[in-house]
Amino acid sequence: MHESRTFGLVAGLGVGAGIFYYKSLVDAHLERGLSPRLLMVHADVRKVMRLAQEREAQELAEYLTGLLQQLADAGAELATIPAFSPQICAAELARMTPLPLINLLDVIAAEAARRKLKRVAVIGARVTMETHLFGTLRGCDVIRLSSEETNLVSTIYARVIEEAKTSPGDYEQLRSLAHNVIERENLDAIVLAGTDLAFVFDEDNTDFLHLDGARVHIQAIMDQLAASSA
């Protein structure tokens, strides 16, 4: 096997999402004949979510920069933050980061453009929905969910983050909501913009038009790592 470049992961946002990324990246390395070299640092999800919800972008960027510096000091060559809420400080973080980042939002925007999506809705944490994926989907009309729908998604998503698992009821409620919004708003896709939604939806049970942000992100990470390891 060829060794991959050393990749850094800011984990803990929440724990389940970090586990999902870790396992997915290890599996993807093995599929490509690469030996993974992964480093992880644990973030305080409560602090990150609070700063994101309060729109304290500079303070959040400073906190994340400290975590990225730990990864850099340990030997990481590039890194990512596998969570959506922290992306509220993406501009600030881009100026401060000690490591090249494979940016979650850039990857999703590129995929939306590649697929020529024109009308979408976002499902994820409250701050992600309220900011329309932080304004990154510039080529799309991003349709706002109703207040009731936003509250439902936010409540379910917060519980999934906390418990690192989902229930059949969570799946059915979110699936039904997605179908209803697509039909009502004539959407091209639902953007699944929450890494912990990987506990709810996978390739087999997502029976509506969608763009899965976390899985697209993992694919982009592996494309870059494979290219640099060739």
Image: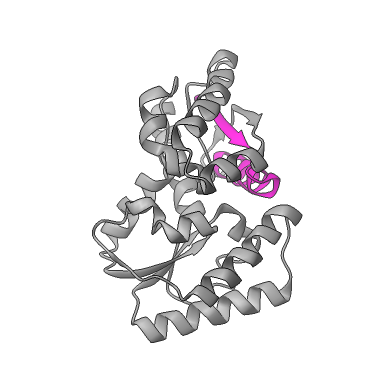
> Which residue is located at x 45 percent, y 52 percent?
216
Q: Is residue 205 above or below residue 103?
A: below
Q: Over which residues does the magenta segment extend?
A: 5-30
**Nearer to us in this view, 23 or 166:** 166
Quadrant in the picture for the C terminus: top left
From the image, give the main secondary structure of the stretch colored magenta. Answer: helix
Instruction: For residue 2, say whether it is visible.
Output: no
Any magenta on residue 102?
no
> Which residue is located at x 51 percent, y 34 percent?
60
Give the image location of residue 31, x and y in percent.
55, 44
**Nearer to us in this view, 121 or 168:** 121
> Which residue is located at x 65 percent, y 66 percent?
156
Q: Is residue 221 above or below residue 157?
A: above
Residue 221 shown left or right of residue 109 in the figure:
right
Q: Residue furthest top?
A: 73
Residue 126 shown left or right of residue 98 in the figure:
right
Any magenta on residue 27?
yes
**Nearer to us in this view, 67 or 148:** 148
Instruction: For residue 195, say whether it is visible.
Output: yes
Q: Quadrant of residue 125?
A: bottom right
